[in-house]
Image: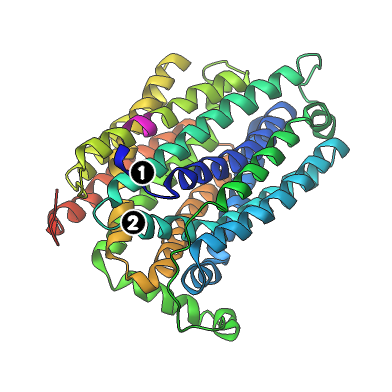
Amino acid sequence: MLALLKIKGFVAFVGIAFINAFIDLGHKIIVQNTLFKSFDGSEQIVLTAIVNALILLPFVLLFSPAGYLSDRFSKPAVMRWSARIAIVITLLITLSYYQGWFEVAFAMTLFLALQSSLYSPAKYGFIRELVGVDDLAAGNAWIQSATMVAILSGIVVFSLLFETLLSGLLVAGTDPALILQYIAPLGWVLVAAAILQAALTQRLPDQHTARTEVSFDWPAYRSAKLLKQNLRLIIHSKPIIQSIVGLSVFWTISQIMLAVFPSFAEVTLQQNNTFVIQGAMALAGIGIMLGAVLVGKLSPHRINRGLIPVGAVGVALGVIALPYVSSLAWAAADFLLIGVSGALMTIPLNALVQFYAPQDKMGKVLAGNNFIQNIAMFSGLILTVIFSLLQWNETWLLYGLGVLALVGVIQTYPVYRKYHSVDGYNG
């Protein structure tokens, strides 16, 4: 894995992946913690689900344009422009904090997601351009590790500073506008990170090959014909669609779990400190980071498909155990197991999607990957909202996730069995 650091632009690329996740998560943490302090019960869960839905929607609605941009233009150029847009967005977010515009800050999660949805296919498509086919698994492990370190850093930095800045304020049921004004200096952390990200994108090598496409077919996009054409690229490739379904199962479980667990911790485990709760959930990120390192060591110059079913079983065991935890310490250990297992499952699946995607259609395939995963996660959030509106105990939703995890175990087996040895890659 360390040999990749010698590739020109790879260190900058890893840094960009880190900062992009750090910015996205930072604002989300601030908004979610504000919701946690200002609301409770079903209202808190519904608003948290809406925040997550705003993050997912652009990946669904901009599936075709995002894929087109990544295939039509240089992937580094797409990332550079996305990074510049992020500077403007973080400045507007900071302004909303200082002015106490909670509705604006809430809505800005959508604009950050718009930027990320255009950036994502270029980022993941660039991995193969930068490291080559032989090191796809190791390259994905580096990016996954950087993303997880960013998530952990974001949780620690933003949750700790959030609680510190509010230490002199009685926040239970406090107006969210007042909370934002107290924590407003955190906005400058987002702005500084966005500027650094834009600077790092200038160090990416431009390896673009000219494409024949010259313009985006807006009429076909509006009529959904483009959507059908792009999805056909994915559906007609069994290893790609089966890998994407496996990824969708894992991230849907994660999405629901992270939306429900704060309320579960507050009601069942009698914990109301956002930093402590976020810290317990952060163990999933540490687990993914450790799992990513393990995948890199077990996948030298290959995609180790044998890790996929092992990871799926570990995720299922962790999710099934979660409703039975009796303390945050046990919950943290369970999140660690889910994280490690999730990395063993998802990193090879991501590498398989990139491996089987045609080079000139890479952006469309990866945008389609985002589309399907986010449709699945959005459906999970709708289910979460329904549970909350009906005032059903969130523990039952956690039981349902255990069933979904078992489905994931069954679904990932064909990916390992049918494509165990293809083009020199052995599991």
Residue type highlighted by circle 2: Val
Q: Is residue 162 left or right of residue 74?
A: right
Name the image quarter holding the N terminus. Answer: top left
Residue type highlighted by circle 1: Lys
Label 2 residue SS? helix
Label drawn at residue 136: none
**Residue 44 in magenta?**
no
Q: CA distance from mark 2 to mark 1?
A: 34 Å
- The magenta region covers 287-291
Can see residue 347?
Answer: yes
Identify the residue at image location x=45%, y=43%: 11
Please provide percent x and percent y for residue 314. Answer: 27, 33
Image position of 249 with respect to 97: above or below: below
Label drawn at residue 245: 2
Please provide percent x and percent y for residue 268. Answer: 52, 20
Label drawn at residue 6: 1
Please provide percent x and percent y for residue 26. Answer: 63, 36
Label 1 residue SS? helix
Image position of 277 with respect to 358: above or below: above
